[in-house]
Amino acid sequence: MPQRIVVIGDIGVVDGMIHIGDEAMFEAAVNALRERGITDITGISTTPAESAERYNISAIRTIGWPGSRADREERLARVVAAVSTPSTLDADDPAHEVIAAIRDSDGLAIAGGGNMSTLWPHHIFERTALGRIAVALDKPVVVSGQTIGPELDDADSALVRNLLGSAEVVGLREPSSFALCGRLGLTDLTQTIDDASFLVSDDVPASSTYCLVSVASHVGDASRAEVVVALAALLDTVATETGLEIVFFAHFGPLDGPSRGDAVMHDAVIAAMASPARIVPPVDSVTGASLARKAAMVVSSRYHPVVFAVPAGVPTIGIPVDGYTGVKLSGALGNFGQDGLLGVDELLAGRGAALVARLWADRDVIRSGAAALAPSAHAASSAWWDRIAAIFGATRP
């Protein structure tokens, strides 16, 4: 009998704005399940109709967690109670559809993400509720490719500990998350890579002529105006030292229309640059992954351009602006033997030029190092999804 799986990812194009990385992890999970014969997939999305069309799946709304923490705690209790007593919730509450989907499924997959953090408590509550619904209905739960924390207060730690402890398997995508979960008393953990690391795995060109750039408007505690000037200077250095064309790609940006999200920051940086630059508009995750994988260099304060680039051995500069982005970027780089972190303070101090020179001089070594690491990483990722599929009662055809 075909398996039916409910999958949660932070997906949904809202007001024409796409988040390439969030969509990529969900898409990678769907692809992996389909490769193992699981084709009846229900996604949970903020915009179900759009996600259903994008991935050719069924899709339903998220449960939703407005209000204060006390409001969310009270809603969590009512949602879980509604598994056995539907009248606990209003008849039009979206949680009913979620409960019904999990009831009719063979399990719940929590796809990769970096949102189990006190920075985004609604994501913790959404996933906690799904996990508790599944447990109440005796359905297996799997958790893949997560960053946990690093900001996690005591109340959120308790929720995360309970959720991960109820899962059949838990995959964590960097050592710091593994260590944090160990401190929470969790032991049955698997260190993985990001779910979307091999969303695209085609051959990369022997030579490339562009540097791909993705920078967010969030710059931590730094002055955005100063960061714009420093980024422009860094990219002018890349253009001068390497001869590469500078190509911008927004990982959170509009599918059409005026600049929003990362595109606003890109416009500002381009205006401050002396070198010419080109913009490629966001379309979908596969386009973003392919652009990063085929680049000669990547400069990014966004996480997933790094995730896409490093398995292909692309020399990559990750620009963390706070502890959260530092954890993710250092993990993504380190998983494939790179260390090109340039903190925002270092960027402002003008230290990027030396890093550009080092990475460019070492580009052949970086590429050969990734070529040695990527096959085993890809095989381990495949084995991870084989393990998940087996939990749901499926195997690769």
Image (spheres, rainbow, N blue to C red):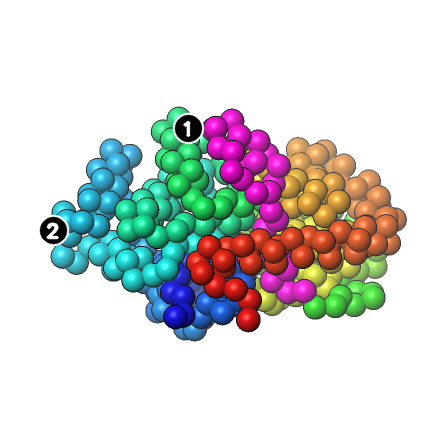
The residue where tag 2 is placed is 87
Relative side of 381 to 244, left or right: left
Residue 55 lies within the magenta run: no
Circle 1: is it few (<14), some (14-19), or many (20+) Cα within 10 Å?
few
Residue at 61 percent across and 56 percent down: it is 383
Position above or below: 97 against 130: below
**Residue 43, visible in the rendered structure:** no
Point out the image quarter for the C terminus: bottom right
Give the quarter of the image for residue 92: bottom left
Of residues 295 and 200, which is closer to you in this image? Answer: 200
Q: Which circle, 2 or 1, is nearer the viewer?
A: 2
Q: Quadrant of the N terminus?
A: bottom left
Mark 2 touching mark 1, by CB under 8 A? no
Label 2 element class:
helix
The residue where tag 1 is placed is 153
Q: Which mark is residue 286?
A: none
Amino acid type assigned to the residue bearing label 1 in the image = Asp
- For the point 54% across and 48% down, the residue is 145
Q: Magenta residues?
A: 174-201
Q: Which percent across, then down, holds residue 33?
A: 50, 64
Position in image of residue 83 (x %, y %): 21, 50
How far, Cα to Cα, is label 2 from label 1? 33 Å
